[in-house]
Image (cartoon, grey):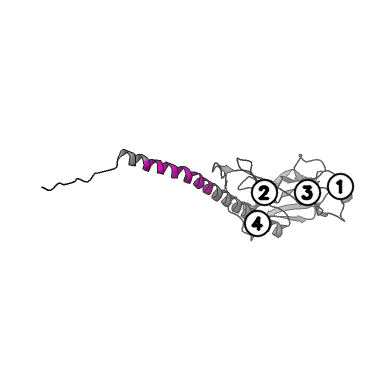
Amino acid sequence: MRIEHRRRAGFSLMELIVVVTIIVILTGIAVPYYNDYIMDARRSTLKQNVANFRKVISEFRADQGRGPFQVPFITGSTVEDVRSPLGATDSELVAGPLQIIRVGGSITPKRRPGFKYLPALPVLEDPQTTERMDWTATGSTLFFVEDGGSPVGQFDFDKDFAFIDTNANAAFDGEATDTVQFLFNGKSSSVYIGSPANPLDYSDIIVTDSQGVSY
């Protein structure tokens, strides 16, 4: 008489518990490393995007002699141009560089043709939340001194004085040290030595994520 042994189907409860325990342990080990990997990848991407953005700003400065972001300015009573560092359509990186033409006693600002710049300012994502990050324009070598008659913080071509801050102390120290950029009011640049100066453009950016890390 032959005795047949049936093969057991499925797993025992103990085997299932062992398998589930192993999966839980592996998950607990792998998930933190995966999250760290994703975070490092996002930070690396953000750093690269910011570096590329700074490169474009640097190339603009090399081409134009100033940064692409400006305070509002006027000629006479007309506001000719407004630049906002966070405005995608207002930046000269998007709209193209401005060329100032002065004929006799009049100033004509116009767009300089033949140059291609960014179609839009880049969108930077927070590596922690993936939400859009704001960035702050900073750094300047071009400053202006207000001479009255225009709103505070607004550069008036006909009245105010602009200079290139060659020695990087945010003040006009004289033509032997700094370089006159715009002076159309008939005054001597020497009257502005030691006067408070405001940045007329910005040449760098600072990006800070939700954890306070700056890039």
Q: In the image, is residue 58 above or below residue 90?
A: below
Which amino acid lies under the numbered mark 2 shown in the image of this protein? Ile
Whole-angstrom CA distance, mark 2 to mark 3, is 17 Å
Location of residue 60 in the rendering, given as x and y in whole percent from the top left corner: 68, 57
Check residue 184 for magenta coloring. Answer: no
In the figure, is residue 125 to the left or right of 57?
Answer: left
**C-alpha gap between disc 1 and disc 2:** 29 Å
Q: How many marks?
A: 4
Give the number of the disc on residue 205. Answer: 2
Neighbourhood count class around disc 3 (C-alpha, 10 Å): few under 14, some 14–19, many 20 upward: many
- Residue, x 33% and y 39% (percent of image)? 14
Q: State yes or no: discs 3 and 1 in contact (Cβ < 8 Å).
A: no
The first of marks 1 and 2 along the sequence is 1
**Mark 3 secondary-structure assignment:** strand
**Left/right of residue 80 with respect to residue 33 in the rendered view:** right
Q: Mark number for residue 192?
A: 1
Say which label, 2 or 3, has the lower sequence index: 3
The range drawn in magenta is 18-38
The reply, left or right, for residue 47 in relation to residue 22 is: right
User: Which residue was labeled with disc 4?
Assistant: 55
In the image, what residue type sits under mark 4? Lys
Disc 3 marks which residue?
Answer: 143
Between the C-alphas of marks 4 and 1, the distance is 33 Å
Residue 54 point in image, percent of width and height: 65, 54
- Kind of residue at disc 1: Tyr
In the displayed orientation, state which residue is furthest to the left: 1
Q: Badges 4 and 3: C-beta atoms under 8 Å apart?
A: no
Distance Cα–Cα, label 4 vs label 3: 22 Å
